[in-house]
Image: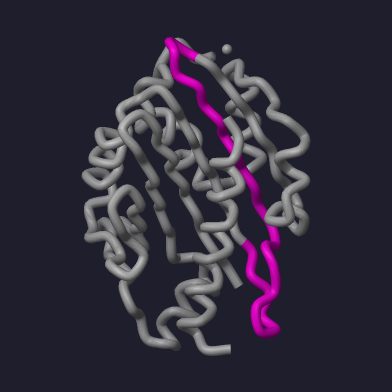
Amino acid sequence: MRGRAVFVAAFVAGAAWLAAASACAAAPPAPPLTATFATFQQFCVAPHGHAAQILAQADAAGWTPGPASMTAAPQFKSMTEVGVRTKTDAGAQALLVAGSGPIGEFSGLAVSADLCVLTVKGIDGPAVAADVGAWVGVPPDPKRTKPGDVTYSFTEDVHGRVAVIDPSDEEAKALVKAGKVHMVIVQFTEDHAMVGYFTPRL
């Protein structure tokens, strides 16, 4: 399988997770759900997408286990660890989905991932998207970005982030194999935002 195809396949699997999470609809005193970007940082970014840590933090913060039917979706079946948490705060409703483990086989290559998705309704969606873009600090992937749906692919080290856009076959395969590529996906409307943090691995 060509390296670039591996990269794209991993993205597609993450997008399927996001679709499953968005189909669903009380806590640390801070941040409130209206501070959606801060909530995303707390649960998805700080734990680097590791499901066990994310879910433990959510439990400690008073989030409620979500419907078991969520994890019955086909996108979750191969995951070794997956969980759903919900919360309502100040008129906003949130869904947190975290998973780690295999996500499927693509042309004979097994792909695993760590993924965290935060969906919040009743907030300023465009403002959340702007906060995420400012934090990522790299251009969005033009092939996977459209109004209300923005994807960032990047590597990260002590020197900062570098956008990964249209890599060569060998570059893409090496980055995914090493777990060095991160994807942040933001989907939003005027009163809703979904932010996903996704790290694929071979």
Q: Residue at x 40, y 22 (%)?
A: 122
Work out whether 64 lies above or below 105: above
Identify the residue shown where x is 48% and y is 13%: 89
Prevailing secondary structure of the magenta residues: strand
Quarter placement of the N terminus: bottom right
Tell me: 50 left or right of 163: right
Residue 155 visible in the snapshot: no
- Asked if residue 103 lies in the magenta stretch, the reply is yes
Q: Is residue 178 left or right of residue 24?
A: left
**Vertically, is 97 above or below 61?**
below
- Lateral position of residue 25 relative to residue 162, left or right: right
Q: Residue at x 50, y 54 (%)?
A: 198
2 shown above or below 128: below
Residue appearing at x 70%, y 26% in the figure: 65
Q: Is residue 86 above or below residue 183?
A: above
Any part of residue 190 in sight: yes
Q: Position of residue 12 (x, y in %)?
A: 53, 66
Front residue of 164 and 179:
164
Q: How many marks?
A: 0
Q: Quadrant of residue 181?
A: bottom left
Of residues 144 and 44, which is closer to you in this image?
Answer: 144
Residue 13 placed where, x, y %?
58, 63
Q: Position of residue 156 (x, y in %)?
A: 35, 59
Q: Quadrant of residue 167?
A: bottom left
Q: Which residue is more in the foreground, 127 or 178?
A: 127
- Is 201 part of what is drawn in magenta? no
The image shows residue 143 at horizontal and vertical percentages of: 33, 70
Segment colored magenta: 89-112
Q: Which quarter of the figure is the C terminus placed in?
A: bottom right
